[in-house]
Image (cartoon, coloured by chain):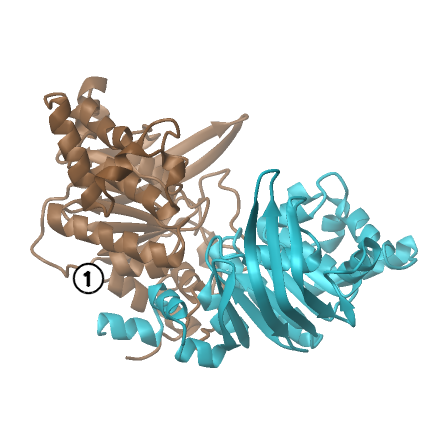
Amino acid sequence: MLTVSGLTTEFRTRVSGVRAIEDISFEVPQGVAVGLVGETGSGKSVTIRSILGLLPVSGHVVGGRADFDGVDLLRANRKQLRDIRGRRIGFVAQNPFGSLNPILSIEKQFANVIRAHRKASRAEIRALALARLESVQVRGPERVLRGYAHELSGGMAQRVVIALAMLHDPPLVIADEPTTALDVTVQRQILDLIDAQVSEGNRSLLLVTHDLGVVAQYCRRVVVMKSGHVVESGAVADVFTSPEHPYTKQLLAAVPPAPWSSAAKEVTGA
Amino acid sequence: MTTSEAPMPNLMELTGIRQVFRRGGKEVHAVNGVSVSVAPGETLAVIGESGSGKSTLGRVALGLITPSAGTVTFDGTVLGDLSKKDLRALRSRMQVVFQEPYESLNPRIRVGDIVEEPLIIHRSGLSKAQRREKVVAMLERVGLTAEHAERYPRNLSGGQQQRIGIARAIITEPELVVLDEPTSSLDVSVRARVLDLLRDLQREQGISYIFISHDLATVGLISDRVAVMYLGQVVEQGPTAEVLTNPKHPYTRALLSATLSTVVGEKREHVPLRGEIPNPSAAPTVCVLSGRCPIEIDECSTGPVAHRRVGDRHDVACLRVDRVDRLLPVEAG
């Protein structure tokens, strides 16, 4: 589905260049959820922004490939990339309020996303938007469509972003820390929602997160990044039960076990 | 972690605390009748999501804001009775560590001066040389070196910055430290080491902590007792091990089920709460979870819900305590 190989990105200022990620290679197979984990500064966000062509102006991809749909995304022109991003890859960012336009009604934003890739009447747009809002369990979808982003709670706004990302039924979904900005009890709802939307459509998912629990419970494969490099990757069942790289071991050991889990009972001796 | 010992006089008692903010003509009821206490050398965790009132409660405990109602007692003294001067003297015995280490450190001041500042304010008897000596000893105690004293905060990592925040807080040897999400902005590997440091300091100096957090797993590692806050109220409180393994409030269960295990395949059944946290624009007159609770009955929305004792120092504000176990079985053994 998505094959990244040798991806290397630099940030350049007038005086110097800094290599942010180097020789990143991984695959996202058809219908599989892949977790991309790492701590602050590991380069996980630079990796997906390189793939999606969303780097800031100082960022430059200097090597590698990212093959998707028979196209190398790193060499695609702007128009190709925009077409792929909207129709073939759904993107869910960390902050839903940064993804939504604050001065357009939600209905207008649905219209823009739909019309960017095909013709549609106002009635058609409305019907589709309502159906999609219902599928992501937005309550009172008519009211939400008439309203604006600032009237939504964080969880509701992220549901709207997910509905927009899924509008063209993309075979690949990329989510960058989609629940980090949300409250704990809402995080699970959103993860379950993304999980359901992805498995219903037999889509692939690339989930960027710093939370190993999210990877353990929602992903089948994992790519572990540190300081701009991939240090370990493989099936979640293997990597989490017998990590090979010292950094992966250290990372797993550092996470306190969920208080109700079997691991917590070993710690407390209860 | 301590188990139940002989009763000790509490170092701090918060009784019937209410805090109402007025913002643009609207009222925000941040804290609604909270009573908690901390014994010497004990860690009380206050856990809740954003808007639960946990940080406001921390500021009330420190005497940084005067509560709309209720009393704060520190070592037998009621904070509200004190003059400004006496309150200031008392405050040297309490300190605070904030969530964002960088934002709570003055970027233009060298690390050594940041850590020294509380000594200048609260230990005016010390000479400059004595202060410097204490600063270096403190930096070394939190895992840094004398060399760090000459640096500026921006030249340190997040974990090192938080160590500076901790050093500044404990250099006056306070009896109580309010830790407001001290590890939430740190990466996991750094977080574990900062928690270790906090635990060691507590053991050495007998400090009491009020540990404010939204993360139950972290709280399980560091606290003796936990108070779970929702919409300005404590819905459940008790010994940490008891609350985390035998939670009796539907909200605590929802929080617990939201914590994902890193053990593959150990995905816990999710306790669903409908919708999201409402705005605290009015003091709730019925159960705070009413409207979101999965096991709600009519009585839940007819009046306020009193706390009832369900175990050793374990209190819960829920009419449906008997049904909570059916909501989600806690795994045996």
When asked about the image quadrant of residue B117, the answer is top left
- Location of residue B136 with respect to B253 vertically, above or below: above
The quarter in which the N terminus of chain B is drawn is: bottom left
| Residue located at (37% from left, 42% from top) | B156
Q: Position of residue B213 (x, y in %)?
A: 36, 50
Farthest-out residue, left: B6
Count the marks: how many?
Answer: 1
**Which colour is chain B painted?**
brown
- Location of residue B235 with respect to B51 vertically, above or below: below
SS for tag 1? loop
B56 vs A159, left or right, is left
- Location of residue A155 with respect to B98 vertically, above or below: below
| Residue located at (55% from left, 53% from top) | A20
Q: Which chain is displayed in cyan in the rendered image?
A: A
Q: Position of residue A24 (x, y in %)?
A: 58, 65
A171 vs B259, left or right, is right
B46 vs A142, left or right, is left
- Location of residue A210 with respect to B278 vertically, above or below: below
| Of A229 and A38, the residue lying toward us | A229
Return the residue at label 1.
B312
Q: What subunit carries mark 1?
A: B
Disc 1 residue crowd, few under 14, some 14–19, many 20+, Cα 10 Å? few
The quarter in which the C terminus of chain B is drawn is: bottom left
Q: Position of residue B110 (x, y in %)?
A: 32, 30
A43 vs B53, left or right, is right
Q: Is residue A152 visible?
A: no
Q: Is residue B23 visible?
A: yes
| Of A120 and B53, the residue lying toward us | A120
| Residue located at (58% from left, 56% from top) | A45
Query: Amino acid under label 1?
Result: Asp
